[in-house]
Image: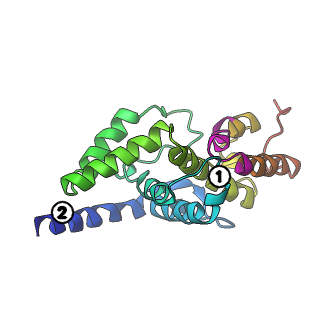
Amino acid sequence: MDHLLNQIEFIREIDKLKYIFRKTKLINSDRPENDAEHSWHLAMMAFVLAGHANEPIDLEKVMKMVLIHDIVEIDSGDVFAYDTTKSHDNFDEELKAARRIFGILPEEQAEEFINLWIEFEEMKTPESKFARSLDRLEPLLQNASNNGGTWREFDVKYDKVIEKKKAIKDGSEELWKFAENLIDESVEKGILSSPLTP
């Protein structure tokens, strides 16, 4: 019974993820996406796009990773990918959050979730690389659908987009080719600054 009560407490705790809003807006919308919506979308992307991974993957593991990867933001908050004021090197802060939040679960589940979160962050396995590819691709789809979205709002340049999105290639060469084409099309449409623009 204690196990069940701990699991229910965890389920209640992660409801807070619905209140963590990201800078990116929903596709063809001006409403910001929340972390829960983002995680659900990545899980569906994993299910649909798994065949494009560079290497054979354990799909269930990828789906678990993308569903839990941002839960730490309940404590640490969302750091915008192109933020120039806050460091993206906040692993220690997020690990502390992972231990607190996942630590609500029974010990065996807590350990599994923490290990999955660390694996996603380290990006060394085929699953974590593919999961990261999806995490980088989704905001690209959103910005391309929203007349530049956060690229325009925060004056993000082409080279910064390429720098952030090139991790897609590590998990899927095919998705990276698609992403590159979408980035180039966005430049042609004038919704992303050209690489030649100062």
Is residue 83 or residue 164 the one in the foreground? 164
Label 2 vs label 1: CA separation? 34 Å
The circle on residue 137 is 1
Under tag 1, what secondary structure?
helix
Give whichever of 135, 106 is nearer the camera: 106
Task: Identify the mark nearer the N-term, 2 or 1.
Answer: 2
What span is in magenta? 163-175
Q: Quadrant of residue 10?
A: bottom left
Is 126 one of the magenta-colored residues?
A: no
* Number of marks in the rendered image: 2
Q: Write the residue at 22% across / 57% down.
A: 105
Residue 171's x, y, as percent?
Answer: 62, 45
Residue 41, compared with residue 195, is above or below; it is below
User: Looking at the magenta stretch, what is its main secondary structure?
Assistant: helix
Query: Which amino acid is tagged 1?
Result: Leu
Quick one: SS at disc 2? helix
Which of the 4 image quarters holds residue 99? top left
The image quadrant where one finds the N terminus is bottom left
Q: Position of residue 93 (x, y in %)?
A: 34, 37
Can you identify the residue that label 2 sits on? 6
Residue 117 drawn at (x, y percent):
39, 46
